[in-house]
Amino acid sequence: MGGFPDCPMSAFAFVRATVRHPEFRRGALDMLNLSLGIAAWGLVTGVAMVKSGLSVPLAVLMSLLVFAGSAQLTALPLIASGAPIWVVWATATCVNLRFVIFSAMWRPYFAHLPRWARCLAGYCSGDLNYVMFLKRFPDGRPQPEQLPYFSGGVAINWLAWQSASMAGIALANVIPVEWGLGFAGVLALLGITCSMLQDKATWLAAGTAVAAAVAAYALPLKLNIVVAIAAAVAVGLGIEAVEQAQRRARAERGGQGEQA
C-alpha cells in the first residue's frame, strides 16, 4: 500500500494519488448508492440534537467530533435530563462497542499503517463502510488498492452524514416532529441492509442478529445491539469455517482421485 509521506509536499502527492486511484472512485460510487439512507439518518440526528436542547454551535461540534449517530441519539436524552457525565460516556461506549468488532476484522488489512492513519480510519469508519469493504475484500489479505477504496467510501459517508446533519441542525425549528423522519431513516437503512443479503450465510447472520437483538432487548444501555452484532459475527465466522473445511475436504478428495 506504499509508504506514508513525511513532509507536506509528499503528503499532498500521496493524497492526490489516492484520490486519482480507480479504487477510490469505486469505493465512492459504492457508498454513493447508500448515501440516501445515510443522509436520512444524519438529518434525523441533526434535528434531534437541537430538539433536545443543545445550542447550534454545540450541536455542530458534536456532529463533527462524535460522528456516530446511534451514540448521539442514545446520549441526547441523558444529556437533556442532566444525567452524570460518566453515565453518558458509559452509555455511548456500550452502543459503540460494535466498532471494537469492526476494528478486529479490519486489523489484517490495516495493521501495518502508522498509528495516526489507523486512528483517522477509526474516526472515519462507519457500519456501511465496514460492510462494503469486506464485501469488496473478503479474503483478509492486505492489498495496495484497499486504502484508496476505503478512502473513497469514507469520504462519501462523511460528507453525506455531515451535510445532512448540518441541514437538520439548521432546520430543526422548521421541520415538524410529525414528519416521522426517524422512522423514514430506519426504513431507508433497512432497505439498504436487505439489498446486501445476497447468499445463505448473510441471510443466516442477519436473522441471528435480529433474533439476538429482540431476545436481549431488556438489557440496559442498548447492549442488545452489541449482543446482536457479536452473535451475527460468530455465526458468520462459523459458516465461513465450515465452508473452508468443506473446500479443503473437496480439494483433498480431488488430489487423491488424481493420484489414483
Image (tube, rainbow, N blue to C red):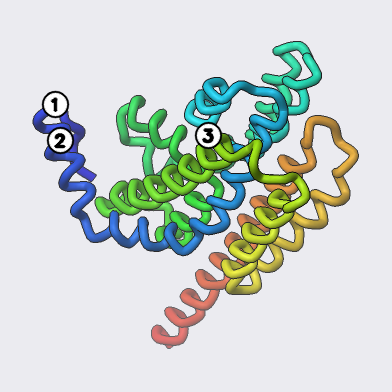
* Side of 69 where 204 appears, left or right: right
Q: Quadrant of residue 189?
A: bottom right
Task: Kindly report which numbered mark, 3 or 1, lies closer to the viewer in this rendering.
Answer: 3
- Tag 2: residue type? Phe
Q: How far apart in space, not on screen, are marks 2 and 3 (Cα)?
A: 25 Å
Disc 1 is placed on an element classified as: helix
Expressed as whole percent of the image width and height from the top left, the position of residue 107 reads 44, 40
**Residue, disc 2:** 12
Q: Is residue 70 above or below residue 5?
A: below
Disc 2 is placed on an element classified as: helix
What residue appears at the point 19 percent right and 53 percent down from the top-left corner?
A: 20
Expressed as whole percent of the image width and height from the top left, the position of residue 28 reads 36, 56
**2 and 1 marks in contact (CB < 8 Å):** yes
- Tag 1: residue type? Pro
**Residue, disc 3:** 67
Disc 3 is placed on an element classified as: loop
What residue appears at the point 77 percent right and 50 percent down from the top-left corner?
A: 178
Q: What is the crowding at mark 2: few (fewer than 14 residues within 10 Å), some, or many (at least 20)?
A: few
**Residue, disc 1:** 8
What residue appears at the point 74 percent right and 52 percent down from the top-left corner?
A: 180
Q: How far apart in space, not on screen, are marks 3 and 1 (Cα)?
A: 27 Å
